[in-house]
């Protein structure tokens, strides 16, 4: 099946710094990728839809200036958490549409801890 | 608007037995897709099974089957012959046809007892 990778798998940073998370589709091209956020013991919430070559579409309540998304190629999307604060600590998961229209493949996730 | 409801926060099942995880949904869209994902403690989301709203037959994938009752708007996951490795969080999700993003339920934590 299709493989999606994320890097880093975990990151600890100081409050006020920025963190970049990469999402790559390894064996297929993804014109659209999705970024989700998952707080402990909660469900996944869609943050934004990342479109290759154009601006991301953010869900209501998600600050686009804080969560910068870039989808520069068909295999790479990045999420940058700018000026991170402890409340941004969460599990961030990306996904990409699979080879079949009915599937969506997820990356392994990135656990962000902001001190 | 779409809504996914999983009413079972936790379920226990004896090894080798079958278990049903409930999922109901609400949508006004005539065409949609329903998914089940497994999330082990490591965090990755593993795709299990898919059911299209116009599919006539219930989806099956190995030990997983989806009990799709369109009139009741339910899409329960049935896991047969449970294994210890099935212990994980299970999420039901829905996607409108033509859109790609998924709406997730709150999840059910399944624990398989030896």
Image (cartoon, coloured by chain):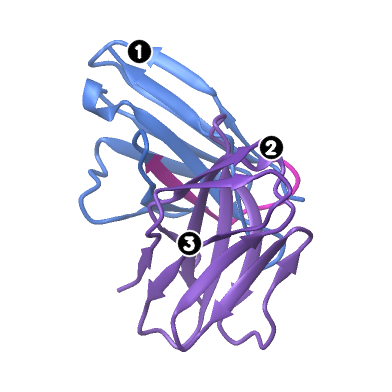
> Is residue A102 among the parts visible in the rendering?
no
Along the line of sight, which residue is nearer the eye, B53 or A18? Answer: B53
The one of A10 and B58 positioned closer to us in this rendering: B58
Q: Chain of mark 3?
A: B
Say which of A62 and B40 sits in front.
Answer: B40
* x then y, percent, for residue A110: 48, 29
Magenta segment range? A26-37
Q: Determine if residue B1 is in view.
A: yes
Quickly name the residue at label 1: A13
Which residue is found at the position 54% from the left and 68% from the top? Answer: B76
Q: Is residue A33 magenta?
A: yes
Tell which chain the image draws in purple. B
The residue positioned 68% from the left and 52% from the top of the image is A29
Check if residue A58 falls in the magenta segment. no
Neighbour tally class for label 2: few under 14, some 14-19, many 20 plus, Cα within 10 Å: some
Do marks 3 and 2 both belong to one polypeptide chain? yes
Quarter holding the N terminus of chain B is bottom left
Q: Chain of mark 1?
A: A
Q: Nearer the viewer, mark 1 or mark 2?
A: 2
Indicate the secondary structure of the residue bearing disc 1: strand
Above or below, comparing residue B87 to residue B102 in the picture: above
Mark 1 crowdedness (10 Å alpha carbons): few <14, some 14-19, many ≥20:
some
Q: Quadrant of residue B54?
A: bottom right
Q: Which residue is mark 2?
A: B84
**Residue under the point 44% across and 25% down:** A111
Query: Chain A hue?
Result: blue
Distance Cα–Cα, label 3 vs label 1:
32 Å
């Amino acid at each position: 099946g299709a493989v999606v990778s994320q890097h880093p798998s975990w990151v600890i940073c100081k409050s006020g710094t920025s963190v970049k998370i990469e999402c790559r589709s390894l064996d297929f091209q993804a014109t659209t990728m999705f970024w989700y956020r998952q707080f402990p013991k909660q469900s996944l919430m869609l943050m934004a839809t990342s479109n290759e070559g154009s601006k991301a579409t953010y869900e209501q309540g998600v600050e686009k200036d804080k969560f910068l998304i870039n989808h520069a190629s068909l295999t790479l999307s990045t999420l940058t958490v700018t000026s991170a604060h402890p409340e941004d600590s969460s599990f961030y998961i990306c996904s990409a549409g699979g080879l079949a229209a009915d599937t969506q493949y997820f990356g392994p996730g990135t656990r962000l801890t902001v001190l | 608007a779409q809504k996914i409801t999983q009413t079972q926060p936790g379920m226990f099942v004896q090894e080798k037995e079958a278990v049903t995880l409930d999922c109901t949904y609400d949508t006004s869209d005539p065409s949609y897709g329903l998914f089940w994902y497994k999330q082990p403690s490591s965090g990755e989301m593993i795709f299990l099974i898919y059911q299209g709203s116009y599919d006539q037959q219930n989806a099956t994938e190995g030990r997983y089957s989806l009990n799709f009752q369109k009139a009741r708007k339910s899409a329960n996951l049935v896991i047969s012959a449970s294994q210890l490795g099935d212990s994980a969080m299970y999420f039901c999700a829905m996607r409108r046809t033509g859109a790609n993003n998924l709406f997730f339920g709150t999840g059910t934590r399944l624990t398989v007892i030896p």
